[in-house]
Amino acid sequence: MKLQRFLSLTRKAIDEYNMIEDGDKIAIGVSGGKDSLCLIRFLKELQRFYPKKFEIVAVTVALGFDNFDLKGIAKYCEDLGVEYHIVETEIGKVVFEERKEKNPCSLCAKMRKGAFNDFVTSIGCNKVALGHHKDDVLETFLMSLFYEGRINTFAPVMYLDRMDLTTIRPMIYIEENDIIGFSKKENLPILKSPCPANGETKREESKEFLAELRDKYEHLDAKLMGAITRNKINNWK
């Protein structure tokens, strides 16, 4: 898929859910993976011609793992002309060494989100952009259904009144396989997650289950997305 098509799908999501307003300062959450790195590129390109003027900054919350070198990402942001910040923490040590959590993902996510939100508000951001794509939407839908017994997925736009921050997800119409192809073509400086729990989560199980369902049922993605939007799950249309 060409860059122009990615920008078209990104803009479609932004326009349909009114994700960006004039004067927004948007913090892009950067994990080091392909999704967040693509999001930096897409929003930077969109910034050049989008009618509403907005700023972007990229922010990584480092969990304190030794084998997590962010120099490549810093250079990537510098080349694009995007301001980049690293928030140093010891979340990894707290979760895995001090607390020794058997199910560490929930606590880690909560602490990481808290550190991220505190920092981005301190530098004047009013919005947070996350790199969730269409596959994430569908996987979360399946996780909620089978693990929680409810019909739910994350919202395209979500306002957190306690922090006065709005979370947006501009890549919800982009498929993961296309992101993988783009990241390889552009040789993006992807970092493998150093987290000990990486690859052993419920999301990975849901990803595998979704792949199995796709092999059995035609147009599965369109049907699931249709169910989400028609039933207006979490403010989806």
Image: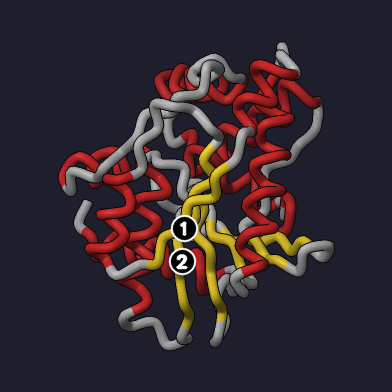
Residue 214 image-quadrant placement: top left
Location of residue 96 in the rendering, given as x and y in whole percent from the top left corner: 65, 18
- Give x and y (percent) for residue 65: 49, 28
Q: Residues within 10 Å of mark 1 (few under 14, many from 20)?
A: some
Q: Earlier along the polypeptide chain: callout 2 or callout 1?
A: 2
- Mark 2 Cα within 10 Å, few/some/many (few <14, many 20+)? many
Q: Secondary structure at mark 1?
A: strand
Figure quadrant of the C terminus: bottom right
What residue lies at 55% left-to-right and 70% top-to-bottom? 16
Q: Secondary structure at mark 2?
A: strand
Query: Could you tell me which residue is drawn at 62 percent across and 52 percent down?
Result: 116
Does the residue at mark 2 contact the one at mark 1 (Cβ under 8 Å)? yes
Q: CA distance from mark 2 to mark 1?
A: 8 Å
Q: Residue at x 56, y 37 (%)?
A: 138
* Point 72% across, 21% down: residue: 146
Front disc: 2 or 1? 1
Query: Which residue does the numbered mark 2 point to in the structure image?
Result: 57
Residue type of the residue flagged with mark 2:
Val
Q: Is residue 111 above or below residue 29?
A: above
70 w.r.t. 196: above or below: below
Residue identified by numbered label 1: 85
| Residue 157 in view here | yes
Residue 42 relative to residue 99: left or right: left
Q: Is residue 81 left or right of residue 110?
A: left
Which percent across, then down, holds residue 166? 68, 65
Left or right: where does residue 79 sit relative to residue 123? left
Between residues 189 and 172, which one lies in front from this camera angle?
Answer: 189
Q: Position of residue 229 (x, y in %)?
A: 64, 53
Q: Nearer the viewer, residue 189 or 138?
A: 189
Q: Quadrant of residue 19?
A: bottom right
Disc 1 residue type?
His
Residue at the limit of the structure toward the right, as seen here: 162
